[in-house]
Amino acid sequence: MNPSRNPFIAGNWKMHRTVSESVSLARAVADGSRIGPRTEVVVAPVATALAAVGKALEGARVGLSAQNVHWEDQGAFTGELSPGMLKDVGCAYCIVGHSERRQLFGETDANVHRKLLALRRHGLAPIACLGETLSERESGVTYDVLRRQLDGMLGALEREEATALLTGLIIAYEPVWAIGTGRTAKSTDAQSAHAYLRDRIRDRFGEVADTVRILYGGSVKADNAAELLAQPDVDGVLVGGASLDAAGFARIIQAAG
Ligand code: PGA
């Protein structure tokens, strides 16, 4: 196993929990989980709770992620937060391109590309999401969609620039039909999609593909995490609903070893 691909378990709390509830949940995750020596754990609270959760997690083995970011450093962008502002409150990671942002808030691959570059410039690790819808899967275009999204997110970079962007990048394959539905992808289908993404990165940019962590997301729970994590190209999981329960999330963390 490539050491840069240590297991990565992320909890996306979406638009749930107040500041004090988020702090309690973060403490419960940090205190109640047995985190294996190689495993990385990250939680992504709502933006209003980032500073307080960041403080509560100081010294703990649980990292802090935002759920979105703008690519500019500052300016007249009402409602947005810059990478520097996220770093300022203790974030080391940021989710970008989540399907809810794509479907409900007009997020595009081109904007995700700008966000990836901005995050890297500030030393934050992006967790870049992609995945097909149910109708795309049923009409047999899953891999075309994944290729289009991946190529759009990575952009037309030269190999050298791409290597800087890809080193330490985290990608999350999240089939839209599996998110919040209780319908998880079969572990073998997840493996095929992950291997496809890694091959595509290798074709375009070479061996750096073997350092990119590819997470699976979509109805991950304590009882299906181990099977997904056992797949050779599944380097971790991005967990929504099940990450709001500290005990269940702790069992998912344990499944990573
Ligand atoms: P879910 O969400 O685990 O509730 O399906 C995953 C995600 O949206 O990241």
Image (spheres, rainbow, N blue to C red):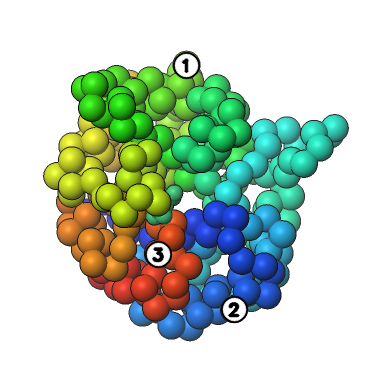
Left or right: 64, with 241 as reference point:
right
Which labelled disc corresponds to residue 89? none
Residue 233 visible at all:
no
Which labelled disc corresponds to residue 156? 1
Which labelled disc corresponds to residue 242? 3
Which SS class for mark 2? helix
Q: Is residue 182 above or below residue 154?
A: below
Left or right: 207, with 89 as reference point:
left
Residue 221 visible at all:
yes
Of labels 3 and 2, the one closer to you: 3
Which SS class for mark 3? helix
Q: Is mark 3 within 8 Å of ligand 1?
A: yes
Q: Residue furthest bottom?
A: 31
Q: Position of residue 191 (x, y in %)?
A: 19, 43
Q: Work out whether mark 3 precedes mark 2 in sequence or the reverse, and give the earlier one.
A: 2
The residue sitting at 35% across, 50% down in the picture is 181
Three-letter residue code for mark 1? Ala
Q: Position of residue 78 (x, y in %)?
A: 81, 37
The residue sitting at 14% across, 44% down in the picture is 188
Of labels 1 and 3, the one closer to you: 3
Q: Is residue 246 above or below residue 92?
A: below
The residue sitting at 47% across, 27% down in the picture is 153
Left or right: 40, with 228 as reference point:
right
